[in-house]
Amino acid sequence: MDKRSGEMQVFAKVVEMGSFSAAAEVLDMSPSAVSKLVARTESRLGVQLFKRSTRSMSLTAEGREYHASCVRILQDIEDAELSVSKTQAQVRGLLRVNTSLPFGQHYLVPLLQDFRQRYPDIKLDVSLSDAKVELQRDEVDVAIRMGPLHDASFRARKLASSRKAVVAAPSYLQRHPAPQSPEDLLRHDCLNFNFRRALDEWPFMVDGGLLHLAVSGGAQTNNGETMRQLTLQGMGISRLGMFHVYEDLQRGDLVELLPEYNAGDIEDISIIYANQKHVAPRIRVFIDFLVERLGPLLALRGDAGHLVAADASR
């Protein structure tokens, strides 16, 4: 049996780690076994791969050439096995998903039955929370986030973009005169979020410039769905994503206020997942499913000024 691929893996790991002992620890082998395998490779090739001294070790010219070939060959082997596993292996396993409460209730949860019918061997663990999650720390495979992404530790696929809208219920406007300018909001009950990353100022375009208005009111909450419900009950004015209140506006349950002053602040809706070379099949099919089903749905729920669907390409 040809053992050259195994020897190549050992050699490549020694180059990567910089020493026999470090490579041995990663490979769960003894340093002497690693050294013997490299020596056997050198003997078979008839060349010296490493320059060794008591203090350092470096590749020879032949070693560098052989290492480049090993990396390419080992990658070809890995790609070949992955290609077969993608087409032959049944998609299965536990899939842990996290998204915000409003997006989960209005968009994600209604689709989960269809997803399970398509992939019955995937077990779902779904959490809805407006709190910011960290994929590795919180053991999440896929998350859907609103707003800017500042963390390079994960990969992201944009699903859509949605602007913010200032809205109120007709019942609130029956008791309070509708604001005619952003400054009028200072005399209104404005609902805000209570988590740290929330903005305590609302942006407006006034006389061609950007105005950030500090608003306040009689209630705060930690999630968008509760804020929507409070707004529908007439407790105050809120600023929510268009994707969240689109149906309420269409039914007349909410009214958009001050649209001519809207600052056009757009927040992206993104799917994020671990930054790994190979994405697990259960994660890959779930992301593709979201793009397939939610991309068109979001695109239909508004024009370019309200909701803009992302390019479904990777």
Image: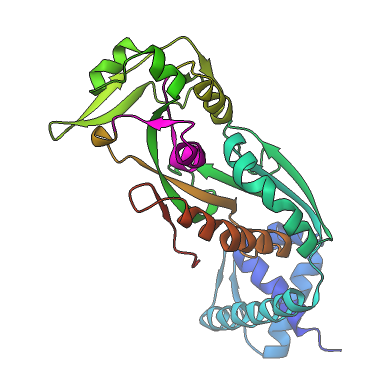
Residue 55 seen from this side: no
Q: How many marks?
A: 0
Query: In the rendered view of the protein, which quadrant contains the N terminus?
Result: bottom right
Q: Residue at x 46, y 27 (%)?
A: 197
Q: Can I make out residue 20 in this image?
A: yes
Residue at left 69%, top 76%?
A: 78
* Residue 98: percent from left, percent from top: 65, 42
Front-most of 195 and 207? 207
**Is residue 139 within the magenta segment?**
no
Position in image of residue 138 (x %, y %): 68, 38
Q: Residue at x 46, y 9 (%)?
A: 218
Q: Magenta segment range?
A: 237-258
Does 220 appear above or below 100?
above
Please identify the quarter of the rendering in which residue 93 is found.
bottom right
Residue 31 horizontal/vertical position (percent): 77, 62
* Residue 163 percent across, percent down from the top left: 38, 42
Which residue is depicted at the point 46% across and 19% down?
Answer: 171
Image side of residue 263 versus residue 302, left or right: left
Outermost residue to the right: 1
Q: Is residue 155 left or right of residue 74?
A: left
Q: Please tell me whether residue 248 belongs to the stretch shown in magenta.
A: yes
